[in-house]
Amino acid sequence: TITISGTADVTAQGGVAGGNCGGGAGIGGGCYGKGGTIKITGGTVNATGGNDAAGIGGGFQAEGGNITISGGTVIATGHEDGAGIGGGSYGAGGTITITGGEVTAQGGSSNSGCGAGIGGGGNLSGAGAGGTITISGGTVNATGGTPPTSKYYGAGIGGGGAGNSQGGAGGTITITGGTVTATSGGNGAGIGGGGGYRGSNSNGTFRTDTNGKAIIKASSIADQTNKESWK
């Protein structure tokens, strides 16, 4: 378990493994390593993934693990296929819970696949799903990775992007509080599935409370099933 709290000031850069292995997350798993359990309750955190790894979460080709953010200022940037917060290349987002703090998450960018801001990693042959993402407080800005020359973006919140296959499924996304901005482009969703050469694997599911406590600004929301209850 990795815990960051109080007035800690943390800057973390993932390493590069070399050979057939990419790199490790800024905070989380090494190459092929899951993110494990990560708790951030305060402080200032700036985390950048190593080769094809998440800023916070999974290393190369690994899922994000169990990530909880309840306070502090967090900036997380994925490298190439890696999510800002969530999975490394090809990895699912895991379980991500945000209840407070100021969170900025930027997915990594490449033509083979782009990471979600929060959620799954990208990959040329198939991207990671968003996982289970719950936001009930804080200020969250999540931006999917932007490919240099293609349209297969990672979702702002949800699945990763895939350059030669289906984008990652959106996963299960619940936003009941806080101020959330989720942005993607191309055929990636602001909230939902990642963009892919063959579309998205699945929109996933999106839910928000009917009491109007969450302020949500999204470039698009893939799952429109319960739109009539949104306020």
Image (cartoon, rainbow, N blue to C red):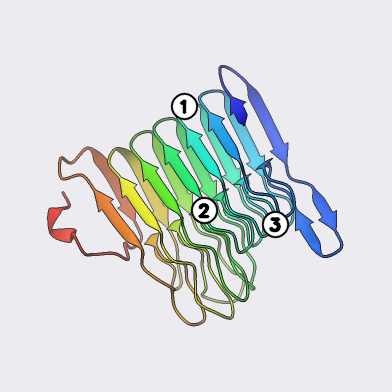
- Give the number of the disc on residue 71: 1
Secondary element under disc 3, as helix, strand or loop, is loop
Q: Residues within 10 Å of mark 2 (few under 14, many from 20)?
A: many
Q: Quadrant of the N terminus?
A: top right
Secondary element under disc 1, as helix, strand or loop, is loop
Q: Which residue is mark 2?
A: 93
Q: Position of residue 15 (x, y in %)?
A: 79, 47
Q: Are marks 1 and 2 in contact (CB under 8 Å)?
A: no
Look at the picture and state if 183 lies above or below 195: above
User: What amino acid does circle 2 point to?
Assistant: Gly
- Total labels: the figure holds 3
Sequence-wise, which precedes: disc 1 or disc 2?
1
Residue shown at 69%/33% (left/top)?
11
Sequence-wise, which precedes: disc 3 or disc 1?
3
The label nearer to you, 1 versus 2, is: 2
Which residue is nearer to you in this view: 218 or 207? Answer: 207
The label nearer to you, 3 versus 1, is: 3
Which residue is nearer to you in this view: 107 or 2? Answer: 2
Residue shown at 51%/50% (left/top)?
94
Q: Position of residue 65 (x, y in %)?
A: 56, 45
Query: Does residue 210 appear in the picture of this structure?
Result: yes
Q: Position of residue 32 (x, y in %)?
A: 71, 55
User: What amino acid does circle 3 point to?
Assistant: Phe
User: What amino acid does circle 1 point to?
Assistant: Gly
Q: Position of residue 141 (x, y in %)?
A: 44, 45
Q: Give left or right: position of 207 versus 18.
A: left
Q: Which residue is mark 3?
A: 60
User: How far separated are the C-alphas under marks 3 and 1?
Assistant: 27 Å
Secondary element under disc 2, as helix, strand or loop, is loop
Sequence-wise, which precedes: disc 2 or disc 3?
3
Residue closest to the far top:
6
